[in-house]
């Protein structure tokens, strides 16, 4: 009985491993990206905690119109919002003030970022914020628990975009919305390295593959797409 069970487990693991290998292509490309491709797009290197100063740069509001992005989300008091790839908490802190008695989950893959976030939460007394250490393939959020998700310039760095997409879909409530914000690859005037940009077409292709429904692209930000996806 035990031998049969172990054989079954091994077969499942081998099938999962094979499907993962088929999903991604390993080859070189832009030196600012890793040698891994998904649906024709090269995945970028993850920004580490050493980029906190850039995330908190004074000119960010002017360059990205962060205030407008938050207005796009139509956050209401009592909502449960997840800031995926929260980094320094630039958006987490702003969302915290809008959800009131709701909750903000600040999700990041790097322990150093989580440590920085915890210090910021204590310093700014953000009592409605909880930090979550994610993995490369899971956001580690409860199923069907999130009203809104925000990803700002982070999705293109996911090493396992399909698996993360499925994990985010699971965490959203039915009808929940995901706001995907990425620098526009279609605009050569956006002063960002190519591998750190995404086109609307590419983003829609990838999120649809994970099971999301594309709603609209809100085109009122200076340099970025603000694409809205729904868990139908």
Image (cartoon, rainbow, N blue to C red):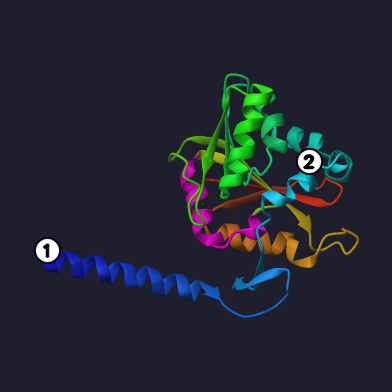
Q: What is the CA distance from the residue labelled 2 to the residue labelled 1?
A: 54 Å
Q: Which mark is residue 160?
A: none
Residues packed near mark 2 inside 10 Å, few (<14), some (14 to 19) or many (20 plus):
some
Image-quadrant location for residue 189:
bottom right
Above/below status of 34 relative to 78: below
Side of 84 relative to 17 (left or right)? right
On the question of residue 140 being in view, the answer is yes
Task: Where is residue 89? Give x, y as percent.
Answer: 68, 37
Image-quadrant location for residue 69:
top right
Which residue does the image show at 32% across and 68% down from the upper left?
13
Which residue does the image show at 59% across and 22% down from the upper left?
127
The residue pinned by badge 2 equals 56
Of marks 2 and 1, the one in the foreground: 2
The residue sitting at the top extreme is: 101
Above/below status of 51 relative to 102: below
Where are the magenta residues, as a range? 155-172
Q: Magenta stretch containing residue 87, yes or no?
A: no
Quarter containing the N terminus:
bottom left
The residue sitting at the bottom extreme is: 27
Q: Nearer the viewer, residue 31 or 49?
A: 49
The residue sitting at the left extreme is: 1
Tell me the element at label 2: loop
The residue pinned by badge 1 equals 2
Query: What is the number of callouts on the image?
Result: 2
């Amino acid at each position: 009985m035990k031998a049969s069970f172990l054989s079954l487990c091994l077969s499942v693991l081998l099938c999962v491993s094979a499907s993962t290998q088929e999903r991604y292509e390993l080859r070189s490309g832009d030196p600012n990206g890793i040698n891994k491709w998904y649906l024709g797009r090269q995945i970028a290197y993850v920004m580490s905690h050493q980029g906190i100063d850039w995330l908190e740069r004074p000119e960010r509001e002017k360059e990205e119109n962060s205030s407008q992005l938050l207005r796009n989300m139509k956050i209401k008091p009592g909502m449960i919002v997840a800031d995926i790839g929260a980094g320094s908490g630039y958006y987490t802190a702003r969302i915290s003030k809008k959800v009131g008695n709701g909750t903000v989950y600040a999700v990041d893959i790097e322990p150093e970022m989580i440590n920085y976030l915890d210090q910021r939460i204590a310093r700014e007394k953000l009592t409605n914020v909880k930090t979550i250490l994610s993995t490369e393939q899971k956001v580690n959020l409860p199923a069907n628990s999130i009203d809104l998700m925000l990803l700002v310039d982070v999705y293109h760095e996911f090493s396992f975009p399909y698996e993360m997409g499925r994990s985010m879909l699971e965490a959203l409530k039915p009808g929940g919305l995901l706001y995907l914000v990425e620098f526009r690859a279609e605009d050569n005037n956006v002063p960002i390295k190519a591998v750190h940009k995404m086109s609307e077409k590419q983003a829609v292709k990838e999120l649809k593959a994970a099971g999301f429904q594309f709603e609209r692209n809100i085109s009122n930000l200076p340099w970025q797409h603000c694409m809205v996806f729904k868990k139908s």
